[in-house]
Structures are given as C-alpha cells and as structure tokens.
C-alpha cells in the first residue's frame, strides 16, 4: 500500500455518517431566533453562549472536526473581520465514541470585528 492509500485509509477510518438534514422551515426559525440575539449588532463580548443556546433549543450543537462538542475560543478580529464556520450536529445522534455526525446542509456562520471602541460587531446565521 503506497503512502497516498495509507493516508486515505487513515482519513476514512474515523469518518462518520452524515446526520439528518435540517428542514428549511426550521432553518428559517433558527435564523430568526439568532437575529433576535444579535439584533443590537454591537457587543462587549462575542455572544457565543447566547447563539449556542438558540441552537440547543432546536436540539442542535456546535461540533469540532472529530464530531465532539466544540470547545475553544475565538481570537483576532482586530483591524479585520474574522469569519468562523462551525459544523453542527444533532444533540440526540451520537456514535459509540460520543461523536455527533455532521449535519449535511447547515453550519453556523459567525463574523466578528473588534472596533476601536473595544466593542464587537457581530453577524451570525445558519448557512449551508
């Protein structure tokens, strides 16, 4: 087996099935709820918890590349807009390792910019 075949085998071993898609009408509801959270547009801190809570209301969580719940922090945003795309999974669907398969038709889009005032300008929505 050559190196390319070994790499592909390694990458595909941990690959998980895709989760059930989010219906379009639910996406619209989620985006409406997120827009209420970020309606002020300018924040002293990035309202990740509040946005994640909207997703939890619909049994959706933000996940890392390995399918586990997202843990991390955001950096940057000073003098440029940062854009982050989070994978999503259903709270109720896990494999035997506790990993959530990626929802195929949705991800959380988050853009933030730290202004000279120290406040953050936030844009967030569920995209594809």
Image: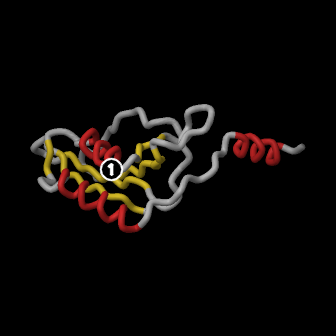
* Image quarter in which the C terminus is found: bottom left
> Where on the picture, by quarter, is residue 43?
top left
The residue located at (36%, 62%) in the rendering is 27
Name the residue at 62% across, 33% down: 96
How far from the left and from the top, in percent, is residue 7?
Answer: 75, 43
Indicate the quadrant where residue 23 lies: bottom left
Q: For label 1, count other residues whose C-alpha is less than 10 Å away and answer few (under 14), some (14-19) or many (20+).
A: some
Residue 119, given in percent of the width and then of the height, sits at 14, 44
Location of residue 84 in the rendering, given as x and y in whole percent from the top left corner: 38, 50
Q: Which residue appears farthest toward the front when viewing the image?
A: 92
Q: How is the image coloured?
A: secondary structure
Q: Residue at x 64, y 46 (%)?
A: 16
Q: Nearer the viewer, residue 110 or 98?
A: 98
> Residue at left 16%, top 48%?
115
Q: Position of residue 81 (x, y in %)?
A: 29, 53
Residue underneath mark 1: 82
**Residue in the foreground of this view, choosing between 21 and 50:** 21
Image quadrant in which the N terminus is located: top right
Pick the front one: 34 or 59: 59
Q: Residue furthest right?
A: 1
Residue 40 as seen in the image, left or right of residue 57: left
Mark 1 element type: strand
In this image, 71 relative to 75: left or right?
Answer: right
Number of callouts: 1
- Quick check: 13 left or right of 112? right
């Amino acid at each position: 087996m050559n190196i390319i075949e070994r790499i592909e085998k390694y990458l595909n071993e941990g690959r998980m099935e895709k989760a059930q898609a989010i219906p379009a009408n639910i996406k619209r509801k989620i985006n409406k709820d997120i827009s209420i959270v970020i309606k002020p547009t300018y924040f002293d801190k990035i309202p990740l918890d509040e946005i994640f809570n909207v997703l939890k209301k619909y049994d959706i969580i933000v996940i890392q590349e390995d399918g586990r719940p997202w843990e991390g922090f955001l950096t940057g945003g000073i003098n440029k807009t940062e854009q982050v795309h989070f994978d999503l999974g259903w709270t109720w669907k896990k494999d035997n390792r506790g990993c959530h398969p990626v929802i195929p038709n949705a991800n959380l889009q988050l853009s933030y910019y730290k202004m000279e005032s120290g406040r953050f300008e936030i844009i967030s929505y569920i995209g594809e």
